[in-house]
Image (cartoon, grey):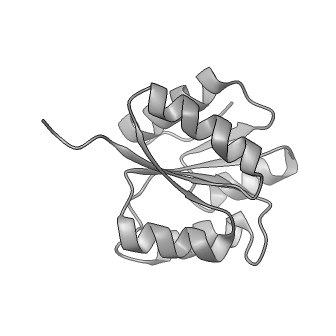
């Protein structure tokens, strides 16, 4: 049996991480977590997740900076990233930086799972 698809969930809010990971695991995904930008980069490089859910507003290094670094590194450039933010202002910057999807907070759990599925199966950029 193949390994489950792994999703790295990056947010500095423990409640959001917990709820998102619970929803993703219920949908059959394996989850990894990080609470800041530096930890996100380290986890992505070390674990090579199949997809990344990345909040824009993070301590130490913001999500847009993390996304730019992920897209610069050969070992992480192909990982699809779904950016998360309550600010619509971040939407275009995230898509321009290489995010596959932009999901506005607050989001429902079903939309989160749908965004991950779509990011894993399409190269189109979408906003939800």
The answer to whether any part of residue 71 appears in the image is no
Q: Quadrant of residue 29?
A: top left
Q: Residue at x 41, y 73 (%)?
A: 45
In the image, 49 versus 35, the foreground residue is: 35
- x 62%, y 71%: residue: 66
Q: Quadrant of residue 44?
A: bottom left
Q: Name which residue lies at 59% across and 73% down.
A: 39
Say which quarter of the image contains residue 34. Answer: bottom right
How many numbered marks does the figure carry? Answer: 0
Residue 8 is left or right of residue 46, and the answer is right
Q: Is residue 128 above or below residue 36?
A: above
Residue 36 coordinates in the image, percent (x, y): 69, 68
Residue at image position (48%, 39%) is: 124
Residue 51 percent location from the top left of the image: 44, 50
**Above or below — where is 65 with respect to 9?**
below
Question: Can the viewer see residue 74 in this picture?
Answer: yes
Residue 2: percent from the left, percent from the top?
Answer: 16, 40
Front position in the image: 15 or 11: 15
Closer-to-camera residue (18/80): 18
On the rendered structure, is 38 left or right of 29?
right
Q: Quadrant of the N terminus?
A: top left
Quadrant of the image for the C terminus? Answer: top right
Q: Position of residue 13 (x, y in %)?
A: 77, 52
């Amino acid at each position: 049996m193949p390994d489950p698809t792994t999703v790295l969930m990056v947010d500095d809010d423990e409640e959001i991480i917990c709820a998102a990971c619970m929803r993703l695991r219920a949908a059959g995904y394996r989850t990894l977590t990080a609470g800041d930008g530096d930890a996100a980069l380290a986890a992505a490089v070390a674990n090579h997740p199949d997809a990344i859910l990345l909040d824009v507003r993070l301590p130490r290094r913001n999500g847009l900076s993390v996304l730019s670094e992920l897209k610069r590194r050969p070992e992480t450039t192909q990982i699809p990233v779904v950016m998360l933010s309550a600010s619509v202002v971040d939407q275009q910057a995230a898509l321009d930086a290489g995010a596959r999807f932009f999901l506005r907070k607050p989001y429902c759990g079903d939309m989160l799972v749908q965004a991950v599925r779509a990011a894993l199966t399409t190269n189109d950029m979408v906003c939800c």
